[in-house]
Image: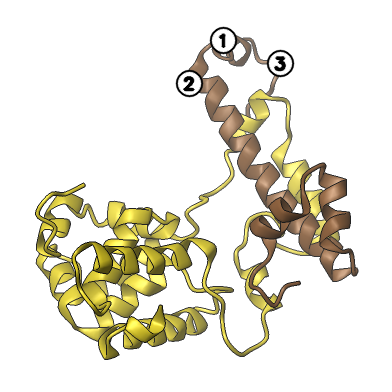
Chain colours: A yellow, B brown
């Protein structure tokens, strides 16, 4: 699949990996790919710009969205008779601070080297290939990657784009989809 | 913090919005605890099969959900 990537699309992937590493995230997900697309400045970035999304707004949104799982709903659990605080205390006694709350736990587990893609972000890349094939394009560039992200609806991508109130239909149109499926 | 014996809470439990919200919260908590315990088991040398057996699911399912990369055999 990668052999069909344009130079620009490869750069997206490299930058996504760097973003994940800098953020000390355990794997490369849709948010990192979005940043990679925006940072590369190719046609995908242009489409994002047209939809009002630039690198600065993306970084802010990613920070504000945080863990898409969100905080645990203590009230709802209490209605079931579950004392979340007690669960938290027990978990933290065994596994340390932030055991059930903190994504950073996962980060410490990974030392160095290549970061893996999440299953979903890999699916996004594959959908990018599918988009290229569907349009009869021989190479995969950042527009296909962005369409792939939109098609799969990966967790963090969805959270970030919702947070930025991005019009998906408009964005797809900018990416050259005549019929927004 | 809301007490489960609160009369209003009990009445609200008939409301599917509240009930489903509780299910969602429970599922999210279960997911986080599962991730914690699967990692714990793996750190202690448990095989994926052993973890799957303990969870009552297939090895493939647990590997797909929790393995970070193909290197995570």
| Quarter occupied by the N terminus of chain A | bottom left
Q: Residue placed at 40% from the left, 82% from the top?
A: A2
Residue visible at 9% across and 54% down in the picture = A178
**Secondary structure under the numbered disc 1 in the rendered image:** loop
The answer to whether dots 1 and 2 both sit on one chain is yes
What's the CA distance linking mark 2 and mark 3? 19 Å
What chain does badge 2 belong to?
A: B
Q: Report the number of numbered marks.
A: 3
Q: Residue beneath label 2, please?
A: B17
Say few, some or many: other residues with alpha carbon within 10 Å of mark 1 (under 14 / 14 to 19 / 20 or more): few
Q: Position of residue B8 (x, y in %)?
A: 58, 12
The residue under the point 40% across, 66% down is A126
Q: Nearer the viewer, mark 3 or mark 1?
A: 1
Badge 3, how many Cα within 10 Å: few under 14, some, many 20+? Answer: few
User: In the figure, residue A74 lies in which quadrant?
Assistant: top right
> Of the residues tagged 2 and 3, which is closer to the observer?
2
Chain containing the residue with disc 3: B
Q: Which residue is mark 3?
A: B5
Against A41, residue B12 (above or below) is above
Secondary structure at numbered mark 3: loop
Q: CA distance from mark 3 to mark 1?
A: 14 Å
Q: Nearer the viewer, residue B54 or A109?
A: B54
In which image quadrant can residue B51 be found? bottom right
Marked residue nearer the N-terminal end (3 or 1): 3
Relative to A83, say whether A93 is above or below.
below
* Label of residue B14 in the image: 1
B70 left or right, relative to A38? right
Nearer-the-camera pick, A157 or A4: A4
Q: Position of residue A148 (x, y in %)?
A: 32, 63
């Amino acid at each position: 699949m990668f052999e069909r990537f344009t130079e620009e699309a490869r750069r997206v992937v490299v930058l996504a990996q760097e973003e994940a590493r800098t953020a000390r995230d355990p794997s490369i997900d849709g948010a990192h790919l979005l940043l990679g697309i925006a940072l590369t400045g190719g046609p995908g970035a242009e489409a994002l710009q047209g939809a009002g999304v630039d690198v600065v707004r993306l970084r802010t949104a990613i920070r504000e969205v945080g863990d898409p799982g969100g905080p645990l709903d203590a009230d709802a659990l209490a209605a079931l008779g579950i004392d979340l605080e007690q669960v938290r205390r027990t978990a933290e006694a065994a596994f340390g601070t932030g055991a059930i709350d903190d994504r950073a736990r996962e980060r410490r587990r990974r030392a160095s080297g290549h970061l893996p893609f999440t299953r979903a972000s890999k699916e996004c890349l594959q959908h990018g290939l599918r988009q290229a094939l569907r349009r009869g394009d021989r190479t995969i560039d950042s527009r296909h990657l962005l369409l792939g992200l939109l098609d799969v609806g990966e967790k963090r991508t969805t959270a970030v784009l919702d947070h930025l109130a991005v019009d998906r239909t408009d964005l797809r149109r900018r990416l050259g989809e005549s019929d927004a499926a | 913090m809301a007490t489960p014996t609160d009369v209003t809470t009990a009445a609200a439990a008939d409301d599917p919005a509240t009930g489903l919200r509780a299910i969602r919260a429970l599922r999210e908590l279960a997911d986080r605890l599962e991730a914690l315990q699967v990692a714990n088991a793996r750190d202690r040398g448990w095989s994926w099969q052993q973890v799957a057996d303990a969870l009552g699911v297939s090895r493939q399912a647990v590997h797909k959900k929790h393995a970070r990369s193909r290197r995570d055999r």
